[in-house]
Image: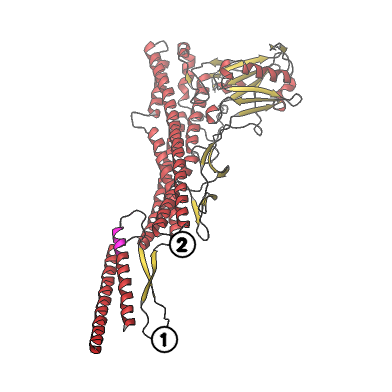
Amino acid sequence: MLNSLHVAQSGLTASRTAVEGVMNNISNEHTPGYKKRIVEFSESSHIDGSVTGRGIQVEGVKRITNEYLYDNLIKEESKESYYMELSARLSDVESLFFETTESGFSNDLNRYFQAMEDLRSDPNNEIYKNNLKNQANIIVEDLKNLYQGIEDIQTVTKNTIKDDVDIINGILADIGTINEKIGQQIVPPNDLLDSRDALEKKLAEYVDITIDRTDEYELRIGGVIAVRYNTNIHNVSLVEDPIAQTDKLNKSDFNAFTTFATGDSVTYRQNNSSEFTITYGDTINAVVVDTPEELMDALAYQINNTTVMSAGVTATVTGTSSAVLELESTSKGEAGSFESVFIFNDSSASTSSFIAKDADSSITAKDDAHIEIFDAAITLSSGKLKAGIENLSTESGKNKFSDYKAKLDQFVQTFVDMHDSFVTQSDGTYLYGEKASDLDSAGTTTAIGLFSGATVNTLVFNESAVVSLDQDKLDYLSKIQWKEDLAFDGSVQDGTAGDATSFSKFFQSTLVTIASDKENTDYLKDTQSAITNALEGSYDKLVKVDKDEEMINLIQFQSAYEANAKIITVVDEMLATLLGMIR
């Protein structure tokens, strides 16, 4: 009889605990990160020969989760975060290049060419000259605004990454604190496990993570350990390592110097805005230039002692028999990029040729940005941070910002070249651009100098050149807008470029590229969102509180509680009867 009372009492306790568990689930239905709990029961062990058993006991309260599904969910959410961040940045760029039927660079370019046509019809008309000046200044301003706009987006991206790194380190510290508390308990508290899961989920928005819970807790970012056990927390740091552009010309690169003699000369031009020429026999820095080695020393001396050049480039010569002329930018990174052009003028052959830099040993300007843990570089595969770093580092291979800026620089390089000078040949046809003029000695070269610069940052409209625009120059300039065979790779305008096009079409192709990049990214984002939502739905169905289900459980456990209470009442009455009989 007493055993029956104990069985009913254990059932009463188990039912009450289950009801409390249901009530806790319902009250935390909307608590962020909360995973529903279930109370685990087991039959009380038999310690004698009792046939009916000794009742029920509460084993504990377990939270519902699925680590495999959870790990895959945060992995997919990390990918989604990457595309969302990239889409947002590309949207900013797209808005910069937005055009209407009346506004935008394409329309301003057309108005500039129309102003050129107007002046061509009346070269002495001051109104037309002023209009051309205004339109030319607008072209320069438009290009600089577009370029600066992209750089501003890069700056915002960099600052955002710095803030995100601080957030990441804060999350890692919080995970470490929770791990320490968990380590102090024999059974990990469910609320702490929920809190740690929420932090892991938040962390996965920024970087890709992998978690090992098999033995001691271990969390890796991009394959590098960030958290191990309860105390080893490794902070993440953003590292920027820009590399300066360095152009190297070996003595062997000056192959034309085998004939270096009286009348020969070398012209150096920097950023298509300043230049000088050194002729055989000139005295530079108290040295007569009559050998290739002395010429290289003279070039370095002149560059370093020409203020406008030395502000951007430092020149040095190393070695003697195998001398190397090095031109290194005074500013590291893409911002310090420069264009150096060396032209050898052979008087005996009446020809000119470009002296190419050594492609193997020269160094391209680079902006390197990456994150590290304990000096170990991390290669991210997903997350918000990956989208930002890709568009800061020129070595990522996916830097959209650098691609768009390069397009603008290519436009400027060709635009300036075409407006600088031209050659009129004996049959009246033209050789277009300054580079073509550098290599020709048969036709008549005409200098214009309407613009200067090799990049958007160095682009300048030379307003004074408008005064000297005569009919011949205007006839040449009026043909530029119609040319469909322009090269935008910095080469000579000889009409042989495989991807040749016009100024208008080149800029339109840039707009198409930006729009295409945005559209493709949005498609990938939407696809990834669908995958993430599907996984999240499955996971939430497993771990989230279902109020209808909980209400059913509540009724069941309440009924069990009432049944056990009635059993206790019955047993109590039976005991009272027995005791009454004894009396």
Q: Is residue 357 above or below residue 80?
A: above
**Residue in front for this viewpoint, 555 or 453:** 555
Res. 49 mark: 1
* Callout 2 amino acid: Ile
Query: Whole-percent x and y of residue 363?
Result: 62, 32
What percent of the width, then of the height, locates residue 370?
53, 40
Q: Position of residue 121 (x, y in %)?
A: 40, 15
At x 65% / y 25%, what residue is drawn? 326
| SS at circle 2 | loop
Q: Residue 204: which numbered mark, if any?
A: none
Which residue is depicted at the point 64% across and 32% down? 359
Q: State left or right for residue 145 relative to residue 320.
A: left
Left or right of 220? Residue 77 is left
Mark 1–mark 2 contact, CB under 8 Å?
no
- The region drawn magenta spans 22-33
Percent from the top left, x then y, of residue 197?
42, 55
Where 238 sits versus 492, above or below? below
199 vs 314, nearest the viewer = 199
Q: Is residue 350 visible?
A: no
Say if 238 sits above or below 579 in the image: above
For label 2, the residue is 186
Three-letter amino acid code at the position of disc 1: Gly
- Identify the residue at the far front of this view: 583
